[in-house]
Amino acid sequence: MAPSSSLVSKLKVQLKLSISRLRMVQQKDTAIAKQQRRQMAHLLELGKEESARIRVENIIRSDITTELLEILELYCELLLARIGLLEPKECDPGLEEPIKSIIYAAPRTDVKELQQARQLLVEKYGKEFALEAIDNSDGKVAERVLKKLRVEPPDPELVNLYLKEIARTYGVDWPKGEKRQDHSSDEDDDSPGGGQAVKNLEEPLTTDELNKATPPRDLGPKSPVSIAPPSPSTDNVNPRIKLPGPPELKPSAKMSGLKKETPSTQAQSESGGNRDEGQKKVVGGKIPDVDELSRRFAALKR
């Protein structure tokens, strides 16, 4: 007998090959089943219902086999993930179900890589362990694996469901008249109240309301430049983008001179009280207020 470490390494390689092979077989079977469904739809369209019922059983069996291969693929992935637990001589209780299920189901498949992985498992754990798995004397083989491997005719109700689904997928009127009834029921649902049209619950908006409405923010041309925030790092956990603000406007020399002259002119107007006060121009071109006008009229009366 080969050492345990070499067996586990060989088993690891074989499990990887089994997983890839099982996936390829599933894809191939799915493509073949799709072609067969198209043929079933053609038979139903021609009215050959008996021939379609017989041939649809092959599609059902193909789907069951595909489901079985999917289960075995999951078991292989589980053993590959827990490959370290295969080192001891005794089988781990948590891996007993997938190992015995593979030993039981591998000869019933056409995947050679899975059968070689089964042979390595039998070599590692012995003939007695393999006989228990083949006979399922201890009931450790998964029930769903046993169910998928049972050879029995499909239920007639399942056959009808398959044919209805195939007919619905490819737009075939089967059983005759059912598609029309479904179409009429859909029309009744679309027109409630005996075919009467439903009135609008909301009145249309007037022109004034539309003018008052606020336009959306994304209306109009967008900027072609977009700035993405930097990714966070250990130095800067919460990065932010600092955009340059508007430039600060400094007053020119002329404007600063005007500001300095403004308080002096106001002081002269208050102290002198001459008639020329009403003729002075206001700096900046502002309109005088009511108090300013009343003071001017009082000065004129003097």
Image: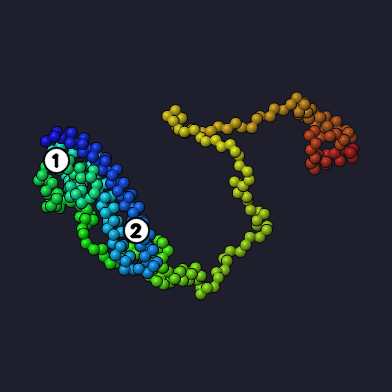
Q: Is residue 92 visible?
A: no
Q: Nearer the viewer, mark 1 or mark 2?
A: 2
Residue type for callout 1? Glu
- The residue that label 1 is drawn on is 123
- Tell me residue 119's x, y (percent): 17, 43
Residue 198: percent from the left, percent from the top? 55, 69
Q: Bin the neighbour count of mark 2 within 10 Å (Cα to Cα): few under 14, some 14-19, many 20 and up.
A: some
- Residue placed most toward the observer, 212 or 22: 22
Amino acid of disc 2: Gln
Q: Are marks 1 and 2 in contact (CB under 8 Å)?
A: no
Q: Secondary structure at mark 2?
A: helix
Q: Which residue is mark 2?
A: 36
Between 119 and 203, the residue placed more toward the observer is 119
Q: Which residue is farthest left?
A: 128
Name which quarter of the figure residue 286 lies in: top right
Q: Tell me the residue at 29%/59% (across/down).
A: 58
Q: Is residue 69 above or below residue 44?
A: above
Image height of 193 relative to 81, above or below: below
Q: Earlier in the sequence, mark 1 or mark 2?
A: 2
Residue located farthest toward the bottom when viewing the structure as drawn: 194
